[in-house]
Image (cartoon, helix red, strand yellow):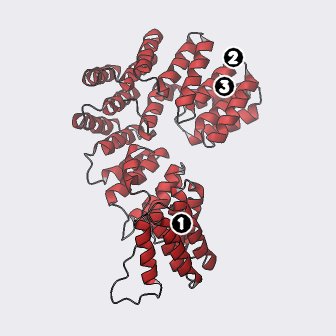
Amino acid sequence: MTSVVKRVGSAFWMLPSLLFVSLASGQSQPAWADAFQSAVAQLRQGQTPAALQTFEGIWKNNSNDPQLATWIGASLDSTGHHKQASPWYDRALSINPNFEPALNDLALNTATLGQLPRAQSLLRKALRLNPSNPRAAYNLGLISFRLRNYADAAEAFKQARGSAQAPASLDQLALAEATARFHLRQYSQSAHLLETVGNRQNHECLLLLGSAHALSGDSPSAIRTLQAAVQGAPDDPQGYYRLALVFMLGRLDHEAQNVLAAGLKQTRNSPMLLFAEALKNDMQGKTDQAIAFCKQARGANPRQPQPWALLGKLYAANGATDDALAAYRQAIALASDAQPAVDRAQLLIRLQRLPEAETELRAIAKRYPDSASVDRGLGKLYREERRFELAEKYLRKAISLDPDDSEAYYALGEVLRITGHTDDAKKEFAIFNEKKPAADARRLLELAATSSASMK
């Protein structure tokens, strides 16, 4: 989860809906109210066995009351007894399967216990019963984000944002929705949402907004925004890193060099900025210098995957395939996305180790079922095996998932050329030539904005 949504998620999860609701004076109190409050006091004092015994005694005489069961579950949840709480919500739902408070609170309970898919399902049911429940929508957004269901997360945050009783500040909800839409590559929508945030000078907001502007094609706005981020937080290498990547996207190497020089002066030996130097040299065809900077970045922080992955690419270009495969293996162990594993599989394809490549790609596909890079890798594999119909299918799917994947256009062009579709092949090669120069910078800018880890 990105740092933006981590901040939004500081309210994660919103406390159960019935938790310690005061039995206000003037209201009709159930007969079990005094005993219930006594059990709650026992929980707070750490007398858990006595409290559980009291709850069971109350339940024995009120076993058809779903509200009571939900209150008991919420009380246990609030004092950290999550496993003991779960059966009480189940009791409530066995009496009334559509009892909304129990659905909400059981969802948060199961989320706390790490059962996120079940929590997501429960919240969806709660929203079907009551589409105007903003707390359920907010929590569904947070859980869907954790599950990488970014489309569901974006829509849930939007639903919560539109409520008259929003469960978080409108700025928080806009940041959360913008972050989910960024993951969906809906960069213009993400930027528009971020522009509505009241505190746009917030550093994390500036970083995400600058990245969204750049990837939606608005380079001038991206540069202004990221320059503001650098000025506001001169000791954070993220601002320099993203600004340099934006200049690389525009093939403005001199400006990128100036930004990196300023950043390395301010934050000496930053692994992130040393890696950016390596990337810049690679884009300029300076392989030896790129390798040297990669090694410096790796030495400054060996736990970051990007320098290892770029070393794999550079070693492969120099013909040192064993070193390349080993570097990719290190990157895979550290990475949070599919790209290093796909890069390694593509090297295996070039080495004609096709069965090994297919085994690795199939394993990656199970972990990342909607990855454009995985589909591109499979397309290249089937092209090499001369299974052209299958190759074209996967390459077109890769392009539909990521219209900026330059390698997929080139591979598709090759398939079309081999199968006699010369004019169509030329179109794909033209798109490749347009997108290739900035492809690495673009992918890394996306990764910088969506990864919870940084190379500070």
Q: Residue drawn at (54%, 50%), measured in percent from left and top?
A: 147
* SS at circle 2: loop
- Disc assigned to residue 326: none
The residue sitting at the left extreme is 231
| In this picture, residue 98 sits left or right of residue 198 | right
The residue sitting at 54% across, 73% down in the picture is: 53
Amino acid tagged 1: Ala
From the image, tell me which residue sits under label 2.
351
Identify whether 407 is placed above or below 184: above
Q: Amino acid at mark 3?
A: Glu
| Residue 382 percent across, percent down from the top left | 73, 29
Residue type for callout 2: Leu
> At which x and y percent is residue 129?
55, 74
Foreground label between 1 and 2: 1
Cα–Cα gap, marks 3 and 1: 59 Å
> Within 10 Å of the Cα at label 1, are there few (<14), some (14-19), or many (20+) other Cα atoms?
many
Q: Of the residues under marks 1 and 2, which one precedes in the sequence?
A: 1
Residue under label 1, please give it: 85
**In which image quadrant can residue 399 be found?**
top right
Which label number is shown at residue 414? 3
Q: In screen coordinates, is 417 left or right of 247?
A: right
Q: Earlier in the sequence, mark 3 or mark 1?
A: 1
Mark 3 surroundings: few (<14), some (14-19) or many (≥20) residues within 10 A: many
Q: Can residue 421 be spotted in the picture? A: no
